[in-house]
Amino acid sequence: MTATATPSLERALPLVAIAGNPNTGKTTLFNRLTGSHQKVGNYPGITVEQHKGKLVLGGGRAVELVDVPGAYSLSARSREEEIAIQAVAGIPPHPKPELVVIVVDATQLARNLYLVLQVIELGLPVVVALNMSDLLEKRGLTLDLDALRAELGVPVVRVSALRDTDFAPLLATIEDVLARPEIGAPGARWTPSSKELREHVRAVEPSVPAEWIGSNGDAKPNRAAQRRHALALWALLSIDEQDELADVPAELRRAVLERRSAAARSGMQIDAEVISGRYGWIDLRIGRIVRERSARTSLSERIDGVLLNPWAGFPIFLLLMGIVFQSLFSWADPLIQFIEARFADLGTLSAHVLPPGLVQDFVENALIAGVGSVIVFLPQILLLFLFIGVMEDSGYMARLACLMDRLMRALGLHGRAFVPMLSGYACAVPAILATRTMERQRDRVLTMMVIPLMSCSARLPVYGLVIAALFPAATVWGFLPAQGLLMVAMYLFSTLTALAAAAVLSRTLFKAPSVPLIQELPPYRMPHWPSVLRMMWQRSRAFLVGAGTVILACTVVLWVLLAFPKHPEITERYAAQRADAERTVRDPAMLQERLATLDAARSSEQLRASFGGALGHAIEPTIAPLGFDWKIGVGLIGAFAAREVFVSTLGVVYGAGKDADEKSQTLRALIREETRADGKPVYTPLMGLSLMVFFALACQCMSTLAAVYRETRSWRWPVFLFVYMTALAWVASFVVYQGGRALGFG
Ligand code: GDP
Ligand code: MG
């Protein structure tokens, strides 16, 4: 006999899942029903929180209630949505629920019914809880519950998770359906009307794994067939080349991809057909169920009259975006400086505590600097997600997508790609996380591929140094500052390049039928702060864990490249010179200065002799046509960690000290005076322009690559991004530099 684990008591309780669209009151209802009997765990095999609780029905019978993540539909491309469908449908490793309570926002019935239809198709016993029914009266709506029951074929109960004191009707219905599942198992369901689509579904059906169907005791053959059909349809809609689904068997994936490409060849749009088919089913019936009492326009409609008005809507939107954009720079700035200062303090502290040497250098310049360069992104990320959260929760984001859809579609982008792209001006990392508001993986990846072209704030110091050092502070037409104009031109250049790249990529690599933007406009409401804060926290944590670890690792690698191999003779020579200076120079201020010069010269020499220096020399032939020498090569290698590192790496190469920033007069002067072997200056305005163009276009940011990796869960996209941007940068700089020379500049 083999020992087996005792099955836990909870597993013996029948499982009841609470599903529904986001913000319909699932969690409120869950909390009201379970009271104090709740606990938090993880979904099987994944670390997404799941709330479970015991619900005691009449007669002392108990069931286990689970709060499933909210979803607008079960067609999932993302991992989170996959969890929702697995938990509702009971796909292994998730246990199959005996009953699904679908929480519906009664004031948004048409939109909510989409998910209801999908769950019903799966053939599980269902109870529809019409929540927020306390608001119906206020909105001037009446619902015909009998008509709804008749159309859906499942029990429908009115509730108000917030106001009700007694949930007896809901509990009684749950009990009824648990006792006699056939009451909750519907006859009515939507099926594809087109013959071609039905054939595709049928072709996928045999590949649906048997354990997904699950006998679960009710081995009624027609029930199993219905479930197989529904799961095949789900797979056909959810699986594509770029989805993130983790638990799809290879056989099913192969069958779906085959069918999808067959459909694409015959010009059929599976997604659009199913989506509009289901909404068509709903539209046909909704008029009989929902009655609007008065024609009085609601507050939401009046607000929309302004915000969706083509004349007023755009300026208001641009104003709002201006505020967001500005605050990402200005509000975050004090915090960023605070964080930078604290990490600098920490570095100094470590230098005091640890004896000088390799360990100290590592702790200060690799570990602390690395962690610091991760944390420093947090203020912008938190702020950005605060804005996005408020815009989503208040209902404005849905309007924005409509407003922008035309413009973005012309470029092959999704309407919701606009805000992430705009955020790219601040920092690509949170902008890439912000692409999650798009459902389709293709739209998200395409947006991710163009966001890093938007000129982020890390490019600013590089532009600043180059412009200040190499371009005269002249004015154009007597009043416009040439340096400022050049800065604006760089932003314009990067924006136009990003838009052009989107237009090209969407017509080539990301060629796909554009999916109609189906966007019901929810009523405006005050943002729900707990969920806004939760989202801010979840996305920031995702950044810290996902991008942060990669950034840290790369900073360490970079440190090794620049610090090794050690050359004891350099150290000894400078130690001797230091001792010499300490003996001969009497004036303390002069001595300080002399020592600082010596230290900077030593770092510079060490760097030239390091692996990084060797790499700089090695890449020199490839960057020489752009007008760059090996010193800029070292700077470029440093800049791969993060662009702003370019300036400080140049500071080290030129011996201006590693704390040199773009405002350092020493560094500017050193750069201006640098000459080639033939005595001509290395840095000409033309070369400066070439350098700025290179920085505008090249993908020199590990954090961005790490974020793309995290969001797409594949190395394919970060590699593609890196290669295409760097190639673009090289070609553009080449054209600028060689073209400029041919025209007689420089
Ligand atoms: P979930 O996203 O589906 O889990 O929704 P939540 O439970 O977080 O609720 C979203 C918002 O709706 C919260 O602000 C709730 O207070 C509110 N809410 C939930 N149920 C009701 C209800 O029956 N009536 C009203 N007026 N508000 C509700
Ligand atoms: Mg919830």
Image (cartoon, helix red, strand yellow):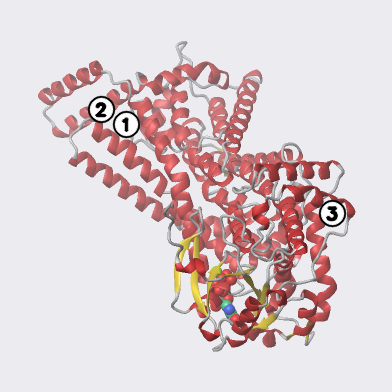
- Provide the residue designation for mark 1: 657
- Provide the residue designation for mark 3: 198
At a point 23% along the width and 18% down the height, the residue shown is 568
- Cα gap from disc 3 to disc 1, whole angstroms: 70 Å
Q: Nearer the viewer, residue 717 or 654?
A: 717
Task: Provide the secondary structure element on which disc 3 rests.
Answer: helix
- 485 vs 139, left or right, is left
Residue 713: give x, y in percent of width and height: 56, 43
| Residue type, label 2 | Asp
- Provide the residue designation for mark 2: 599
Which of the four quarters of the rendered structure image does ligand 1 lie in? bottom right
Tag 1 near tag 2, CB within 8 Å: yes
Residue farthest to the right, as pictured: 195
| Residue type, label 3 | Arg
Q: Nearer the viewer, residue 261 or 694?
A: 261
Point out the frontmost of discs 2 and 3.
3
At a point 57% along the width and 64% down the height, the residue shown is 69
At a point 79% along the width and 67% down the height, the residue shown is 189
Is any part of residue 496 visible from this angle? Answer: yes
Which quadrant would residue 286 be assigned to in this image? bottom right
Residue 211: give x, y in percent of width and height: 64, 54
Crowding near the residue tagged with mark 1, few <14, some 14–19, many ≥20 C-alpha atoms within 10 Å? many
Residue 193: give x, y in percent of width and height: 87, 59
Is any part of residue 477 visible from this angle? Answer: no
- Cα gap from disc 1 to disc 2, whole angstroms: 8 Å
Above-or-below relation of 185 to 598 = below
**Disc 1 or 2, which lies upstream in sequence?**
2
Above-or-below relation of 104 to 310 = below
Tag 3 near tag 1, CB within 8 Å: no
Residue 557: give x, y in percent of width and height: 39, 31
**Disc 2 or 3, which lies upstream in sequence?**
3
